[in-house]
Image (spheres, helix red, strand yellow):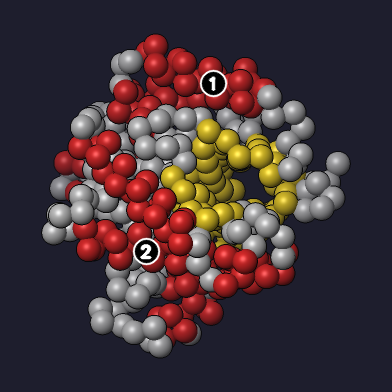
Amino acid sequence: MFLVGDAGEVDGVGNPVLQSLANEVERWSGALARDSAVTVLFLGDNVYPSGYHDALDDDVARDSVRLGNEIATVSGPSARAYETQGIFISGNHDWANTSEPLAQSRLKNLEARLDRDRGAGPAVQLLPQAGSAGPTYVDFGPRIRLVMIDTQWWLAEGRNETAIAEANNRLADLLADSRDRDVVVAAHHPLATGGEHGGAMSFWSTLGVRWLLNRTGAVSQDLSSQVYQDMISGLRDAFTRGGTPLVYASGHDHNLQVIRGTEPGDPVYTLVSGSASKLTSGLIRVPGMDMGLAAPGYMRLTFLRDGGVDLSVVSGPTSFTACPEGATPAHDCLTLWPTTFRTVYSRHLKTAP
């Protein structure tokens, strides 16, 4: 299971991050040689800057290229032959950073594009479906349950306490019903982060404005905002009632982080994988942080036959978030640069019983 977030700003023929990912997806799909043995989770902000535009809009050509480069990671011959899954989760930019009705239009456009491509081969889909908070789930045999939620819906709903309580109850029920499966909850927004949305920014780098907005909780996309704190509290409550997930996978901050749970109701691990096409250097240590790296890359979860679960963080040089303008498929950025990506951190998330 690959975790890649905020990949929606890849133009041209691609970038080294997605090409390295595509190479790995092909290798693992062919080696495991079983249907749906490999899954790629795109953790939101799949189309920058404002979601997937309407068919007659001037920006739709750009949007098509950006989403197409992500779809290409699960479109190789082995990936198609063995039904490798490409699951896309919505982020705030996919919502066009707004609310009804424009947000729903952009989400439906994104969903329709994925549906069209799925009909042509690659097993891609938007989950939860456009306009739904979720949770929705996929079980991979008796060992793994993947639960997906649209956290931007939580933030956009704001004070609709009834709707949010119902969604949290459904989440708790899905966790309680998971039995002995290892549970991965996937969303766009993290529950903990040492990145910019968690306050890692200097006063002077933003002339004080962005720093002040973060410190006062004025930006809903920052953990300091009241609506974000309410979302975290509700999710922790659902986890406490339904069962603690092994992993909460997210993007949103443009770096790579591994954070152990420290508060009641926290998942065992929160993973932030949001540097597929954008990179921010601000990163501070937060409670439970085992690893934080401001570099492009993605993560891989490996579910072992003996019941163990391993995590690998794959990364490359900081300049490898984009190819030069006008690069061709034969350019070094798609042939040589991806070979520089290496596992820079690994650990056992769960040992064999």
With 229 as the anchor, is 148 left or right in this view?
right
* Residue at far front of view: 119
Query: Residue at left 42%, top 58%?
Result: 117
Q: Nearer the viewer, residue 114 or 334?
A: 114
First of labels 1, 2 by sequence position: 2
Query: Residue at left 38%, top 42%?
Result: 90
The image quarter containing residue 215 is top left
When the figure is inspected, residue 265 is found, relative to residue 272, above or below; the finding is above
Quadrant of image for the C terminus: top right
Q: Nearer the viewer, mark 1 or mark 2?
A: 2
The amino acid on which the numbered mark 1 sits, given as a three-letter code, is: Arg
When the figure is inspected, residue 129 is found, relative to residue 233, above or below; the finding is below
With 14 as the anchor, is 32 left or right in this view?
right
With 47 as the anchor, is 274 left or right in this view?
right
Q: Label 1: few (<14), some or many (≥20) within 10 Å?
A: some
According to the picture, the residue beneath numbered tag 1 turns out to be: 170
The amino acid on which the numbered mark 2 sits, given as a three-letter code, is: Gly
According to the picture, the residue beneath numbered tag 2 turns out to be: 68
Q: Label 2: few (<14), some or many (≥20) within 10 Å?
A: many
Residue 319 coordinates in the image, percent (x, y): 37, 72
Q: How many marks?
A: 2
Whether residue 308 is visible: yes
Q: Secondary structure at mark 2?
A: helix
Query: Residue at left 23%, top 63%?
Result: 62
Residue 108 coordinates in the image, percent (x, y): 31, 42
The image quarter containing residue 248 is top right
